[in-house]
Amino acid sequence: MARPSLTIRLPILMPNRAEQRYSCHGCGECCRDFTIELRPSDFEKMNRQGWDQRLGESWWVSFAGRRWLKQRSDGACIFLGNDGRCRVHAEFGLQAKPIACQVFPFSFSPEPTRARIGVSFACTSVRKSDGESLAHHHAEIVRMQSEVHEATQPMSLPDLVRGVQATEEEVGIVESALDTWLGNDGLSGSLRLEGFAWIAQSLRVATLDRVRSSKLRDLLHTLVAAAPQELGLLDATPPSGRSMKLLRQAVFARMEDPKIARLASQGRVKSVLRQAVTSWRWSHAVGHLPNLGGNHQVRFSQVEGVSPIFAGPEARSIDELLRRWLRVSLAGGRAWGSGLYGLPINEGVALLALNAVCAAWIAQARAASESRTIVSWEDFSYAVGRVDRASGRAPWLGSSGERLRVQWMSLSDSLRKLARWVGSARGDC
């Protein structure tokens, strides 16, 4: 008789960030936004609930050899009720839902001896920091861990640079240094963003395979200490046309949201062609941007008329959201390794910095869509949600093409220049 297999359960490490809180408030935004892939256990569990008969139609679709929750024409989940509640949850309880729905906005990032818990800022309540402390959810996350196979399996630490595995000490050194910069209350928001981009691109281009342990600590200490003075001495000219083109491409990659129903109806060839045309338009700033939640669509050129994100009266609250987003991403293991496409630390930090720059540009675009020239907290909150929903989830952001884009931006000093441009182009940092 075969012995039953034992499930390894890694200890859970919640982000130690007292300023970040969360409780589900039933807004239903995630149910209107996300495309949910069904695990075999999800499908079997929900199939027993008899939804085909209840709904009078199939509740799932098949695409690319996998099963997905069916969505309505507006992108909302078929189970989202008129009252904004999930019908599965309402009738059968939380544990009757697909595990991806149960876990959100949390995620698992396994390491050799623990699993870090990431928090997605795609959730409105997370961005508002509204609810209970993160520690309050510990027991429920432990319960869900057993249903997420990959969350129970130890994984190696990330590479420091590609091909050179980091030690636990080195992971802590990088995380601590970046958190120190982000947590510095003496910085303005614009300086914080530009400095984070500068430190990130410095790590991206450094030969870190020769800078290990105490040398890595010394390097990061020097970068963090020197940044406030160093940034004022660096080139303050606007980003080049190529830099802006790459930024628009990066924003498009984070805004692109293919829906299963549309992909299935259009077919692979039409879908690829549509994506190629849209990507070309973004690269060349041709036509209108998609709906960004404002009153009307805007042309790319109109974004240039919006002030930097820290130029308005809500600069302090925008800075609070920016630093909380980046610090929680670092603490939750969503800046490299298993939480971000398996990227090395130096590439992951640079990608995180580019995410922040993309969010700033989207916030400017949303302000333009409401005929405003000043960015509000709501604009930036919307933008952070759009960018973070793709981070770690959209596979193309972990592709060689995206890595090369970030590499060029780092080598050319474009990442820092872009951060300065969207944060404080007038030098008022």
Image: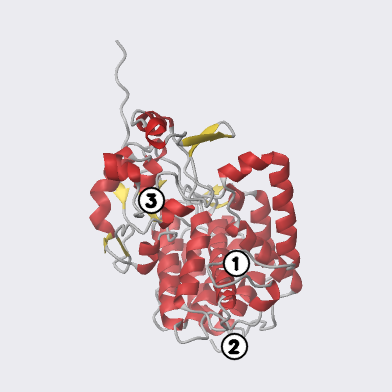
Q: Residue at x 27, y 63 (%)?
A: 131
The residue lying toward the viewer, choosing from 260 and 282, is: 260
How many marks do you count on the picture?
Answer: 3
Label 3 or label 1, whichever comes before in sequence order: 3
Q: Residues within 10 Å of mark 2 (few under 14, many from 20)?
A: few
Q: Which residue is mark 3?
A: 104
Label 2 or label 3, whichever comes before in sequence order: 3
Q: Which residue is mark 2?
A: 427
Q: Which residue is mark 1?
A: 201
Q: Residue furthest top?
A: 1
Residue 30, by quadrant, is bottom left
Task: State the image coordinates of residue 197 (x, y, percent, origin top left).
Answer: 56, 70
Q: Residues within 10 Å of mark 1 (few under 14, many from 20)?
A: many
Mark 1 → mark 2, Cα distance in angstroms: 20 Å
Report the amino acid beneath label 3.
Phe
Query: SS at mark 1?
Result: helix
Q: Residue at x 58, y 57 (%)?
A: 347
Q: Residue at x 36, y 52 (%)?
A: 117
Q: Is residue 311 left or right of residue 136?
A: right
